[in-house]
Image: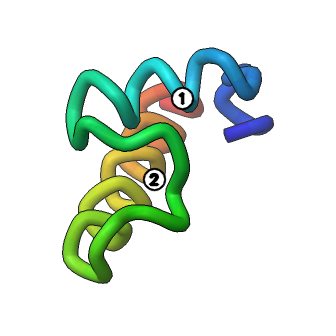
Amino acid sequence: MKRLGWGKERGIKHLIEKYNQKSRRNLTDEQLLEFWNYLKNLERKKSS
Protein backbone atom coordinates (compact mmCIF):
# COMPACT_ATOMS: atom_id res chain seq x y z
CA MET A 1 0.00 0.00 0.00
CA LYS A 2 2.93 2.32 0.64
CA ARG A 3 4.14 1.93 -2.94
CA LEU A 4 0.73 3.13 -4.10
CA GLY A 5 0.82 6.13 -1.82
CA TRP A 6 -2.03 4.78 0.28
CA GLY A 7 -2.06 5.69 3.94
CA LYS A 8 -3.71 3.67 6.66
CA GLU A 9 -6.93 5.66 6.35
CA ARG A 10 -7.19 5.01 2.60
CA GLY A 11 -6.71 1.28 3.12
CA ILE A 12 -9.35 1.13 5.83
CA LYS A 13 -11.77 3.13 3.68
CA HIS A 14 -11.38 0.66 0.81
CA LEU A 15 -11.78 -2.36 3.08
CA ILE A 16 -14.97 -0.94 4.58
CA GLU A 17 -16.43 0.00 1.19
CA LYS A 18 -15.57 -3.28 -0.52
CA TYR A 19 -15.67 -5.89 2.26
CA ASN A 20 -17.41 -4.17 5.19
CA GLN A 21 -14.29 -4.84 7.30
CA LYS A 22 -11.84 -2.45 8.97
CA SER A 23 -8.83 -4.75 8.90
CA ARG A 24 -7.20 -7.21 6.51
CA ARG A 25 -7.09 -9.65 9.43
CA ASN A 26 -10.88 -9.92 9.26
CA LEU A 27 -10.94 -10.91 5.58
CA THR A 28 -11.42 -14.46 4.41
CA ASP A 29 -8.56 -16.04 2.49
CA GLU A 30 -10.46 -15.44 -0.74
CA GLN A 31 -11.10 -11.77 0.09
CA LEU A 32 -7.48 -11.26 1.09
CA LEU A 33 -6.26 -12.71 -2.20
CA GLU A 34 -8.74 -10.52 -4.09
CA PHE A 35 -7.53 -7.43 -2.21
CA TRP A 36 -3.88 -8.31 -2.82
CA ASN A 37 -4.54 -8.77 -6.56
CA TYR A 38 -6.40 -5.46 -6.64
CA LEU A 39 -3.42 -3.67 -5.11
CA LYS A 40 -1.00 -5.46 -7.41
CA ASN A 41 -3.01 -4.37 -10.46
CA LEU A 42 -3.11 -0.78 -9.22
CA GLU A 43 0.66 -0.84 -8.81
CA ARG A 44 1.10 -2.11 -12.37
CA LYS A 45 -1.15 0.63 -13.74
CA LYS A 46 0.71 3.26 -11.71
CA SER A 47 4.10 2.15 -13.02
CA SER A 48 2.93 2.05 -16.68
* Amino acid type assigned to the residue bearing label 2 in the image: Lys
The residue labelled by disc 2 is 40
Which one is in front, 43 or 14?
14
As measured in the structure, the alpha-carbon distance from the residue carrying label 1 to the one carrying label 2 is 17 Å
Q: Neighbour class for label 2 at 10 Å: few (<14), some, many (≥20)? A: some
Q: Position of residue 13 (x, y in %)?
A: 46, 19
- With 40 as the anchor, is 37 left or right in this view? left
How many discs mark residues in the rendered view? 2
16 lies above or below 3: above
- Determine whether the residue tagged by mark 1 lies in a helix, strand or loop: helix
The residue labelled by disc 1 is 12
Q: Mark 1 or mark 2, which has the lower sequence index? A: 1
Q: Which residue is painted at 51% across and 57% down in the image?
A: 24
Q: Which residue is painted at 66% across and 17% down in the image?
A: 9
Q: Position of residue 31 (x, y in %)?
A: 25, 65
- With 3 as the anchor, is 33 left or right in this view? left
Q: Which residue is painted at 58% across and 32% down in the image?
A: 47
Residue extending farthest to the bottom is 29
- Determine whether the residue tagged by mark 2 lies in a helix, strand or loop: helix
Q: Quadrant of the N terminus?
A: top right
Which one is in front, 43 or 31?
31
Q: Position of residue 44 (x, y in %)?
A: 46, 43
Q: Neighbour class for label 1 at 10 Å: few (<14), some, many (≥20)? A: some
Which one is in front, 47 or 26?
26
Say which of marks 1 and 2 sits in front: 1
46 lies above or below 24: above
Disc assigned to residue 47 = none
2 lies above or below 5: below
Q: Which residue is painted at 35% across and 54% down in the image?
A: 35
The part of the image, by quadrant, that contains residue 16 is: top left
27 lies above or below 41: below
* Amino acid type assigned to the residue bearing label 1 in the image: Ile
